[in-house]
Image (cartoon, coloured by chain):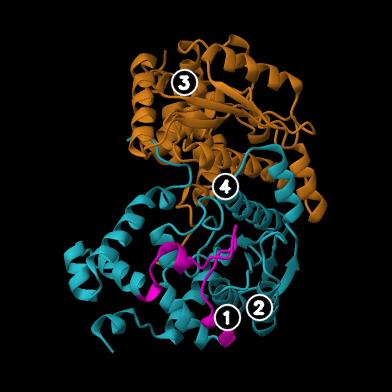
Chain colours: A orange, B cyan
């Protein structure tokens, strides 16, 4: 194992325990009665579901849009619900998205973001009714490279896996008993097409994560990052651009204000 | 004029100039071609429209829901568009809200938040297509007492009037030539009913603003705030509760994470 691999390695037991405490404390502090989260069939929401289920009463909403969500994802989501024991609610957002698209100009990318935002609105609608917190399912890799919809899937009250890189979430998933096919499949947002995240970004998370670790957690410059990771400098520069250009997505929710 | 009134008083000319520079610089830095914002017929969006129009190409979207938006608000919004010279787009969100409500349990309050979030999704859909920034219309008073929908009207790329208290926005409106009837009418969100903001909160902005100024900008405790403003201590305590309990709404957009 390289030095870097060992730095990105986590103690799954104690990390899971911290996350469970964080979720429980957040719910208690907010005088809420549990959490609600979106369950997609992907890795991140599976791990989030397992952690939330260990912490408090958890409702997982499955919100497919039949226009773009493969049936296989719904089957995986149901399997995660079964092994984690979360309550489920299924709502097809297709008709809402269609109604939205009818009234305004749009394209594939903008409509993908609309889907993420309608899901957010749906989670908060449930949260308002049931006095629960919205748990976001973004991981640290996605948050740092901006691979999420601002005020959509990136919007929540608490973000239980926001401190874990994708490769760490994968390790955690094994520890939490998430089915192997969900751990091994490539991450894909299914917001508008079936491309995987890594295809779209052009790098694997085995490259992205050590780069981000050196760049963000250790504050190294590009040359140092490339040296330490042994990863090509053009890839490092690519991640730096993603990181810098997505800064606004991680800012305060009201947006930038005058200094 | 009391000491406090004079502290809350702004130089409208130089404040407007700073806001215009901030908007222009933000647009330039983001390599965007202008801004899009929601225009409701209320005071805040009127001032925001006037400032944006002086800064860059501005599209103001009017997004009524015929179920709750009074015709008089649309007339006021049109008048603001006329005097400020912004481009307008009108989209009725009623059918989208109705489609949303069909599929899930909801109540008046939760559906009010859904309206704010659908408007946000609509602004970002336009922003995606036209490469413009979303300008939020929340003022400092609303942001500090939590009088906005999280990830809804409180969500934007830039927040041009987030540094101005409501009473200052009102002063600015006069300077910017906003029609008197818009300046003088009581603020109302029209998310789910026709109550004014001040009725709902139980305090006037002439009380809220000096309290917030002492409490937040000057860091005074409740006794000091009550002394300095001459406002009853129960009202001060009420504002403190609103300020503290809405802290989570002003946090990073991903939500709370483990420390």
Do pointers 1 and 2 mark residues of a single chain?
A: yes
Do pointers 4 and 1 mark residues of a single chain?
A: yes
Please state which of the two labelled residues, at mark 4 or mark 2, is closer to the viewer: 4
Helix, strand or loop under label 4: helix
Q: Residues within 10 Å of mark 3 (few under 14, many from 20)?
A: many
Question: Which disc number belongs to residue B76?
Answer: 2
- Marks 2 and 3 sit apart, C-alpha to C-alpha, by 49 Å
Q: Residues within 10 Å of mark 2 (few under 14, many from 20)?
A: many
Which residue is under mark 4?
B110
- Marks 3 and 1 sit apart, C-alpha to C-alpha, by 50 Å
Query: Which quadrant of the figure has residue B240?
Result: bottom left
In the rendered structure, which segment of residues is drawn in magenta? B179-206
Q: Residues within 10 Å of mark 4 (few under 14, many from 20)?
A: many
Question: Which disc number belongs to residue A53?
Answer: 3
- Front position in the image: A174 or A243: A174
Question: Which disc number belongs to residue B182?
Answer: 1
Please state which of the two labelled residues, at mark 4 or mark 1, is closer to the viewer: 4
């Amino acid at each position: 194992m390289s030095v870097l691999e060992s730095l990105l390695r986590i103690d799954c037991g104690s990390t899971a325990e911290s996350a469970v405490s964080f979720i429980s404390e957040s719910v208690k502090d907010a005088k809420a009665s549990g959490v609600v989260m979106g369950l997609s069939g992907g890795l991140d929401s599976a791990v989030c579901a397992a952690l939330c289920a260990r912490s408090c009463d958890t409702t997982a909403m499955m919100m497919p849009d039949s226009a773009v969500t493969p049936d296989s994802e719904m089957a995986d989501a149901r399997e995660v619900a079964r092994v984690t024991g979360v309550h489920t609610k299924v709502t097809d957002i297709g008709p809402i998205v269609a109604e939205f698209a009818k009234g305004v100009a749009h394209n594939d990318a903008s409509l993908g973001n609309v889907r993420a935002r309608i899901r957010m609105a749906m989670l908060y609608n449930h949260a308002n009714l049931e006095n629960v917190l919205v748990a976001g399912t973004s991981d640290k890799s996605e948050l740092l490279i901006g691979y999420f919809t601002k005020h959509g899937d990136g919007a929540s009250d608490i973000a239980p896996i926001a401190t874990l890189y994708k490769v760490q979430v994968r390790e955690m998933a094994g520890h939490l008993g998430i089915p192997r096919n969900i751990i091994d499949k490539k991450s894909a947002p299914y917001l508008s097409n079936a491309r995987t995240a890594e295809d779209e970004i052009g790098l694997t998370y085995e490259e992205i994560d050590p780069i981000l670790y050196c760049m963000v957690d250790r504050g190294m410059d590009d040359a140092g990052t490339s040296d330490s990771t042994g990863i090509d400098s053009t890839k490092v520069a690519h991640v730096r651009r993603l990181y810098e250009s997505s800064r606004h997505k991680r800012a305060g929710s009201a947006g930038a204000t005058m200094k």
